[in-house]
Image (cartoon, rainbow, N blue to C red):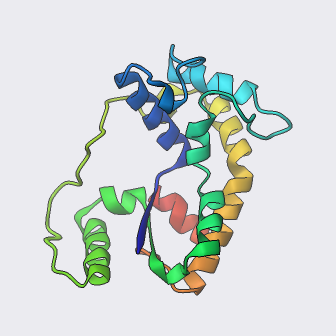
Amino acid sequence: FFVVLLGEPLARIQSSWYHAKAQNFPTYWGFKDCCTHSFKDALHTLLNKSVDGRWHHGLAGTGSVWASMYGRHLEEYMKWFNASQFVIVPYREYSADAERKAAVCGELASRLNSTMDCTRPEPYHENMHLHPHVDEDLPEEMREKFHKLMKGDQRRLVNVLEKMGNEGARLVNYKGGSIKQWLEDGW
């Protein structure tokens, strides 16, 4: 089975940028040739290179954007795998309070037909690099422009999650109602 951990897209890109910075911007992170001064400058470059409300292909840094386009990725996976093979976990369901973490752990233990210690107090953070909250790192107008560019993929993600849920995917801690709200609350 697959476990898909979904972080809020802009926060995930920001985390990727700071991780790349800590690694001295190796080319595989996709920021080295354009975007090493600050995360704000990196996103500014990406946003200004968008064409007709779409991300520009081939621009450094877009790999990090592409990795946050979860709707497109899950649609492709659904062409090859059954929805029942997926456990979908919004990031805060894994990293938040003990009860939410225990639900994630319990779901994984159930899927693995295994006993697991679901009382571990903190999630494991192998690639953790300190950085400011995205609201402190970027002005509101940049965040809004980013979210506007991602709106199509967000709709796609909500639609594919709804379909996956109806076809047997486990949406951890989803209790019914709006999948969009569950996702945004869990990011």
**In the image, 137: left or right of 22?**
right
Look at 23% across and 54% down and name the residue there.
123
Q: Is residue 171 visible?
A: yes
Residue sitting nearer the eye, 181 or 8 = 8
Compared with 2, 128 (above or below) is: above
**In the image, 186: left or right of 124?**
right
x and y, in percent, of residue 71 in the image: 64, 60
Looking at the image, the residue that sits furthest to the right is 52
- Name the image quarter holding the N terminus: bottom left
Determine which quarter of the picture holds residue 181: bottom right
Determine which quarter of the picture holds residue 144: top right
x and y, in percent, of residue 104 in the image: 32, 70
Looking at the image, the residue that sits furthest to the top is 37
Residue sitting nearer the eye, 154 or 2 = 2
x and y, in percent, of residue 72 in the image: 66, 58
Compared with 182, 60 (above or below) is: above
Compared with 43, 83 (above or below) is: below
Determine which quarter of the picture holds residue 149: top right
x and y, in percent, of residue 114 in the image: 19, 81
**In the image, 134: left or right of 77?**
left
Q: Is residue 176 visible?
A: no
